[in-house]
Image: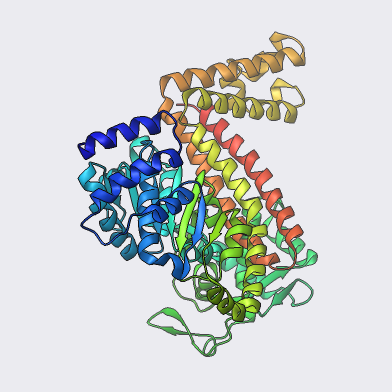
Amino acid sequence: MDPRATLQALKRRAEEGESPESLSHSALDLVGRSAAETAVPFDDETRRMAVRLAGGTMIHGGRVAGEDRLRGARVLAGFLHALAGRGVHLITPDEPQAQEEGERTAAVYGPLGMTVGVLRTDMSRAERRAAYGADVTVGAYRRFGLDLLHDRQAMAPEDRSRRDAPAAVVKDPGHVLVAPIAEPLTLVEDDASPAHELRKVARLTAALSDGQDYAVDTDRGVVRLTPKGRDRLHDAFGVTDPAGMETLLLEKRVGEAVLANHRYVQGRDYDVADAKVVPVSSGELPKGVRLRGGLLQAIEVKEGLTVSDAQWVTTTVSVFEYFRRYPHVGGTSLAELMFTAELEELFGLTVWDLRGPDELSTQQQYAQQMAVYLDLNRRIARWSRLGEQQRAELNDLRDRSWEPHELRTLLRHSVGEAVREELRRSDGDPRRLRRGLGELAGGRPPERLTDTGDPQSIADTVLTNARRVCDDRLLADPDTQRGGVQSAVDQAAVYQAQAEMYYRDLHWPDDLAAFEEALTGVHEGLRTQFGRAVARHALRRN
């Protein structure tokens, strides 16, 4: 029978809901004939592994399986997922391996009429969209994750590249899932430096006292303000919202200025060459602390140099968040003998361990090392959980804005909350409403709203007219209104990322409760700021 006709018959069976197990025998025969010229073995053991992979199992193959059979299992598992027409992602540790895996997979799938897309860093948006539109998409984890972050910031559907897939098949899960745990993927952008504020911070810092106003964790390069120091800072800068994001960023700048002025010394920790700050390799900068961002700016102010732009994290995703997007995650490992417990415990994955007794005994020498490493990753997982939930809420808001009904609901809710807050602030007195809201939302000057009667009638009139204005503007220009919502979400996501990094540095590794309390406070504030920003955009004058 013609291979392509057989493929179409298999696709119909998959679309009708047949399981990978029931399709696997026919699929093995078809793929095995197509791969006859390759070195990949396709036999019943390969089929059994592929079915396990397609069901979401990680296979520790060891010498019993061998790399060739594991490679065949990945190819066949990808084929079983692709039959349903919803795509599958084959994920590798790096781009060279993705290229190799893509070429091997294409050699098997190509003669059957199935397409394979391979992700590269240097692709155009059209090329990337075509790769995601293929039956099977192959790429490095980092590339898949960064594409997800870019698409989350897209301002129009045509700016998106990715197509979500229901399944991932992973090569070398120790390198793809476990190794990146401590380093989430981030997008950064340069931002103009508030040099005048940095200089004011530096002047304030000179007046602060070690032990009374702040304490320095010298091993980690982290500054904690005392209650007294925080009060002095708030008074000096006229802070009115101690829990707000602007206050958090101000405290972060003060901490960096303390380090620059009181801890790090030119000639010992850094030098100035060609008007640039460069680190001294033998200096006393703690491990992991680099001369960049706010710390670099603080040193530049101290040395009287031109202040460089800061890099802001605009959005981030952890390895946990990324792989939870897939209903099914399977993979194969040959050489990584140390990660079975982590795959099961941290990711909740089933592991089918085919290693023999000799291979298992070899692992015993790593037991103590792995206990420490596993404990660290458990801790990272706990510290990541709240941030993941909060980012998921923001991402959900952004995704909802693409649907017209959801966009209208978001706008009306935000406008309603803003109007109620303004009415509470004015104690129901229309004369105390800010003129923009009184004229725009109420449809008349504030002093004439008294014509509507009692305070409840005034409130109902203002709220009804505000929603009418909101609906009219949404109907007239939905793209502008959607853009306002998405911009507000993106700004909240930037602040969320900055807050999470700042508070983790401040409280890691001993005070998870304080970290979560601080992050919760920030998130609640961001919800309020988001609603206000959306309402201002929806009701502002044209």
Toward the viewer: 452 or 228? 228
Q: Can residue 318 be seen here?
A: no
In the displayed structure, does residue 191 sit left or right of residue 358?
left
Q: Is residue 273 above or below residue 534?
A: below
In the displayed structure, does residue 370 sit left or right of residue 135?
right
Q: Quadrant of residue 238?
A: bottom right
* Residue located 59% across and 20% down the image: 466
- Locate the N terminus by quadrant: top left
* Residue located 57% across and 51% down the image: 495
In the displayed structure, does residue 86 sit left or right of residue 38?
right
Toward the viewer: 275 or 219? 219
Q: Is residue 258 above or below residue 353?
A: below
Toward the viewer: 193 or 377? 377
Q: Position of residue 437 (x, y in %)?
A: 60, 25
- Locate the C terminus by quadrant: top left
* Residue located 59% across and 51% down the image: 496
Q: Is residue 87 above or below residue 108?
A: above
Q: Position of residue 42 (x, y in %)?
A: 33, 55
Taking the view exactly as shown, the residue that stands out farthest to the front is: 44
* Residue located 76% across and 16% down the image: 455
Q: Position of residue 463 (x, y in %)?
A: 64, 19
Q: Is residue 244 above or below residue 396?
A: below
Toward the viewer: 339 or 402? 339
Q: Position of residue 413 (x, y in %)?
A: 61, 26
